[in-house]
């Protein structure tokens, strides 16, 4: 079999109810090139292994399947890094075991763009959300201009967002990222957003005007699980931005400072809620630099009593609600 053009990474843990659909979304791809599907099971305690074994039993034309199962659970991010290092394709895509693709031409469309445009390092698409608990699909927002290419600051400031299951990127860029990651003393998080920021710094991003998959929202996921897990995730996002600010050459410090300020406004109530003194101090300093007296007072009030702290958190939620209504 020929060397693969695209490597598809599928990490899985406890996905017995979803993994079959994820695998089928990859196996249905119609491409004029070879694909390798790398499935890495992080020692799932359920029937994920049996379902994977059954799903990959038959042969699939043009698709090489490599299945690995860890003997011990190593965690989501280490498992993700382990899987990425197994890629041998020219391009890399990611579909986690609880998401799935719906467009059989997803990889072909994206690879065609990368083949014809050397300046583009990552191609993304739209996707639908599916909330498992309510069984409700949310269609994608398609108000992004797909006629233009996007760059590092568009992703940094949230002008565009990239869902992991929609991305196809050059494998050389992820290899370069791991070198950079090691050069920073492994202080970066290796979350998908952090990696995509690195890719966007070194290349352009293309958004295709098509919906290619479904992002499944689960109550126990890393980004949608317990509030304390969400806070740990937010801290990693914030730290990644600060590290990039220090380590990347030729950056616009004003844009970075505005991004830090915007994230401080969005994150500080979580720091208050979990009494995270380190981040409360960091966010308070950012508010002082931006003359945000309202939030400085809010932080000081929160220290006086639990009631005042809860009032500050509710008030900030109200401000966010009003802001979203005005959009």
Image (cartoon, rainbow, N blue to C red):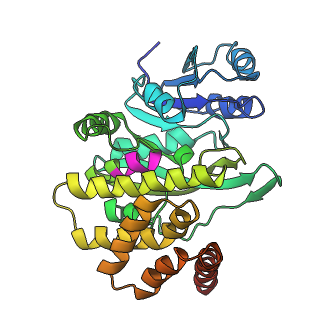
Near-viewer residue (324 or 296):
296
Q: Residue at x 65, y 44 (%)?
A: 221
Residue 322 left/right relative to 80? right
| Most common secondary structure along the magenta stretch | helix
Near-viewer residue (263 or 227):
227
Name the residue furthest front.
304
Residue 56 percent coordinates (x, y): 67, 17
Q: In this view, does 242 lie above or below 179?
A: below
Residue 15 left/right relative to 42? right
Q: Is residue 195 magenta?
A: yes
Near-viewer residue (167 or 45):
45
Q: Give the range drawn in magenta.
A: 192-197
Name the residue furthest right.
134
Residue 320 percent coordinates (x, y): 59, 78
Q: Does the magenta stretch include residue 279?
A: no
Residue 26 left/right relative to 7? right
Residue 97 percent coordinates (x, y): 64, 34
Q: Quadrant of residue 18?
A: top right
Q: Residue at x 53, y 67 (%)?
A: 272
Check the picture and name the quadrant holding the C terminus.
bottom right
Residue 225 percent coordinates (x, y): 66, 49
Count of numbered circles in the view: 0
Name the residue furthest left.
250
Q: In which quarter of the image is residue 60?
A: top right
Residue 146 left/right relative to 28? left
Q: Residue at x 52, y 46 (%)?
A: 164
Q: In this view, does 51 lie above or below 190?
A: above
Residue 290 at least partly seen: yes
Residue 157 at least partly seen: no
């Amino acid at each position: 079999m020929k060397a693969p053009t695209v490597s598809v990474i599928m990490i899985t843990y406890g996905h017995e109810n979803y993994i079959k659909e994820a695998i089928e979304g990859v196996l249905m791809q119609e491409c004029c090139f070879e694909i390798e599907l790398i499935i890495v099971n992080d020692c799932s305690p359920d029937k994920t292994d049996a379902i994977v074994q059954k799903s990959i039993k038959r042969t699939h034309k043009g698709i090489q399947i490599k299945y690995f199962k860890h003997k011990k659970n190593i965690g989501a991010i280490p498992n993700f890094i382990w899987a990425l290092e197994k890629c041998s394709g020219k391009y890399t895509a990611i579909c986690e075991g609880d998401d799935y693709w719906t467009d059989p031409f997803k990889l072909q469309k994206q690879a065609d763009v990368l083949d014809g445009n050397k300046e583009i390092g990552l191609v993304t698409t739209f996707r639908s959300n599916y909330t498992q608990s309510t069984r409700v699909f949310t269609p994608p927002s398609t108000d992004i201009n797909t006629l233009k290419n996007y760059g590092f600051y568009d992703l940094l400031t949230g002008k565009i967002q990239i869902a992991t299951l929609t991305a196809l990127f050059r494998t050389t860029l992820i290899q370069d990222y791991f070198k950079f990651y090691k050069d920073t003393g492994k202080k970066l998080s290796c979350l998908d957003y952090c990696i995509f920021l690195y890719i966007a710094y070194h290349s352009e991003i293309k958004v295709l005007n098509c919906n290619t998959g479904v992002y499944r929202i689960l109550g126990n996921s890393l980004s949608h699980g317990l509030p304390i897990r969400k806070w740990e995730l937010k801290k990693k996002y914030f730290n990644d931005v600060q590290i990039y600010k220090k380590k990347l050459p030729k950056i616009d410090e004003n844009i970075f400072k505005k991004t830090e300020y915007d994230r401080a406004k969005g994150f500080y109530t979580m720091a208050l809620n979990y009494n995270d003194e380190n981040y409360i101090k960091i966010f308070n300093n950012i508010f002082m630099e931006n003359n945000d007296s309202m939030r400085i007072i809010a932080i000081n009030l929160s220290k006086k009593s639990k009631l005042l702290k809860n009032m500050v958190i509710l008030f900030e939620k109200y401000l966010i609600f009003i802001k979203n209504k005005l959009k």
